[in-house]
């Protein structure tokens, strides 16, 4: 049966500009669809990325619920036996030099054998933020009849539960109830100044031992430096040498507020999925409550009015103000005074949400701020979407409406860029970026409380 994509816009937002924007966003997702999943970009990111696919599915549900389900199912097909969802699933039809680190670097099926890496699919060995259960629940809500017909939730629920179990057990490196990340690529904000201090403990790989494919498609001024990239490569090589065993020694191990806020919200989504399937939601609800308490206890900083990253090497908070510290607004159970402080911080001098083109990824007044370099200042659409959703969770409707309007304006004017200059809104990175298009569709089409 031929798949039909729904290109309509709900009546309340069906202005001429919104219709044009929707058509443009839909075209990006159609062009980036491979037949089983969606690449973030045909040039810079030609494989399947983990949290990208979750965000993409959230947007795809407005075009085709079935295609959105397939997006998540194709990613979960590469899940490791220990429960981890790898951050890249490689397309075997592409040559190794299409992206670095490539499959021959990760060696997942051999180096990851004891951790349960799949024997056929080639993947990376690290992970990305756990948005997947939230995405699965939203995809189900887009067409419950189609979801039930295909038994979508029944099939993905055990895999999502195993994914969370992996994070809550093997990745609770401090034993304090939060998941740790062991590589700067895992929190998704690859080049954030939050990683500068822990990365000083890492001796970079020699430049002649790797070739950066990202510079073939991105301007060096936008990308991580060669020194930082060498550290990323060395960390990944060390993890590979340890068989991707989380019990080993980690030169880089931090607890990130965005990562753990998304795990909390996804546990709440798993509770809804369990209830829909006739299972007991209580264990997921209890884990979400425990995560919320640990998030506040471990990562909230009263002085700055933000959540901060905790470096597990010295058990200290890292004093860098990042957009990751605002994302916990998503969590419904936050204490009221923390919600007040976060919304004040969002509009204060460090982020200026109501006067910038879009929320910067790093403190506008910070020592490491760079408005064009990857995650060191530029504004990203996925973090804006998460914060917009968080503002609505806590009834900050006016602020959410302002952010939604800024998002849609900037997405359209920047040709669905990967990220933008936070002060001017000028596009940076690659254009026609899939999660930018997908989340544009979601803000155009989803009910505010969905």
Image (tube, helix red, strand yellow):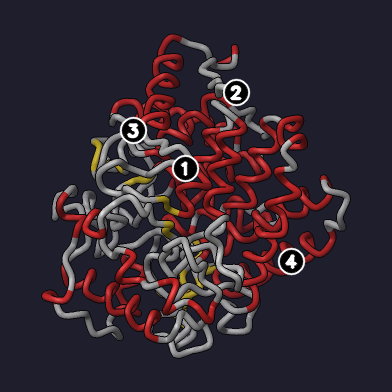
Residue name at image x 54 percent, y 40 percent: 57
Look at discs 1 and 2 and give the one toward the viewer: 2
**Does residue 448 appear left or right of residue 358 in this picture?**
right
Q: Which residue is mark 2?
A: 1
Sequence-wise first label, 2 or 3: 2
Sequence-wise first label, 4 or 1: 1
Separation (CA) of disc 4 from disc 3: 36 Å
Q: Secondary structure at mark 4?
A: helix
Q: Quadrant of residue 284?
A: bottom right
Look at discs 4 and 1 and give the one toward the viewer: 1
Q: Residues within 10 Å of mark 4 (few under 14, many from 20)?
A: some
Q: Which residue is mark 3?
A: 416
Q: Which residue is mark 1?
A: 37
Of the 4 image quadrants, the one containing the N terminus is top right
Sequence-wise first label, 4 or 3: 4
Sequence-wise first label, 1 or 2: 2
**In the rendered structure, are the residues bearing label 4 and label 1 in contact, judged by CB atoms less than 8 Å apart?**
no
Q: Which residue is mark 4?
A: 287
Q: Residues within 10 Å of mark 2 (few under 14, many from 20)?
A: few
Separation (CA) of disc 2 from disc 3: 31 Å
Residue name at image x 44 percent, y 79 percent: 253
**Does residue 30 appear left or right of residue 341 in this picture?**
left
């Amino acid at each position: 049966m031929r798949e039909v994509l729904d290109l309509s816009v709900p009546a309340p937002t069906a202005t001429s500009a919104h219709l044009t924007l929707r058509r443009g966003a839909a075209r990006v997702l159609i062009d980036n669809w491979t037949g089983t999943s969606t690449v973030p970009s045909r040039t810079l990111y030609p494989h399947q990325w983990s949290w990208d696919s979750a965000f993409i599915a959230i947007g795809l549900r407005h075009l085709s619920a079935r295609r959105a389900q397939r997006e998540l199912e194709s990613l979960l097909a590469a899940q490791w036996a220990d429960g981890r969802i790898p951050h890249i699933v490689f397309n075997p039809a592409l040559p190794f030099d299409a992206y670095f680190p490539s499959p021959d670097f990760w060696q997942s099926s051999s180096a990851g054998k004891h951790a349960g890496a799949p024997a056929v699919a080639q993947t990376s060995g690290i992970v990305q933020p756990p948005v997947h259960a939230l995405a699965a629940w939203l995809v189900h809500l887009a067409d419950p009849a189609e979801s039930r017909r295909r038994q979508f939730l029944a099939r993905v629920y055990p895999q999502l539960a195993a994914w969370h179990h992996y994070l809550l057990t093997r990745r609770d490196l401090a034993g304090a109830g939060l998941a740790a990340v062991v590589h700067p690529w895992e929190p998704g904000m690859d080049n954030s100044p939050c990683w500068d201090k822990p990365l000083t403990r890492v001796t970079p790989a020699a430049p002649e031992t790797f070739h950066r494919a990202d510079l073939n498609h991105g301007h060096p001024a936008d990308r991580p430096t060669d020194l930082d990239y060498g550290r990323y490569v060395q960390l990944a090589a060390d993890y590979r040498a340890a068989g991707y065993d989380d019990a080993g020694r980690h030169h880089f191990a931090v607890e990130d507020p965005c990562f753990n806020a998304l795990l909390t919200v996804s546990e709440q989504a798993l509770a809804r999925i369990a209830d829909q399937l006739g299972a007991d939601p209580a264990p997921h609800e209890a884990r979400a409550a425990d995560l919320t308490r640990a998030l506040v206890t471990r990562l909230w900083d009263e002085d700055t009015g933000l959540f901060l990253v905790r470096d597990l090497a010295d058990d200290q908070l890292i004093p860098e103000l990042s957009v990751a510290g605002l994302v916990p607004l998503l969590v419904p159970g936050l204490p009221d005074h923390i919600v007040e402080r976060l919304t004040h911080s969002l509009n204060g001098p460090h982020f200026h949400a109501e006067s910038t083109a879009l929320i910067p990824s790093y403190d506008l007044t910070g020592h490491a701020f760079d408005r064009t370099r990857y995650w060191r200042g530029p504004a990203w659409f996925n973090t804006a979407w998460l914060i917009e959703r968080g503002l609505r969770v806590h009834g900050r409707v006016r602020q959410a409406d302002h952010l939604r309007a800024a998002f849609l304006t900037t997405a359209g004017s920047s040709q669905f860029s990967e990220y933008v200059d936070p002060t001017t809104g000028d596009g940076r990175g690659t254009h026609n970026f899939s999660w930018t298009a997908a989340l544009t569709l979601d803000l155009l089409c989803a009910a505010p409380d969905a």
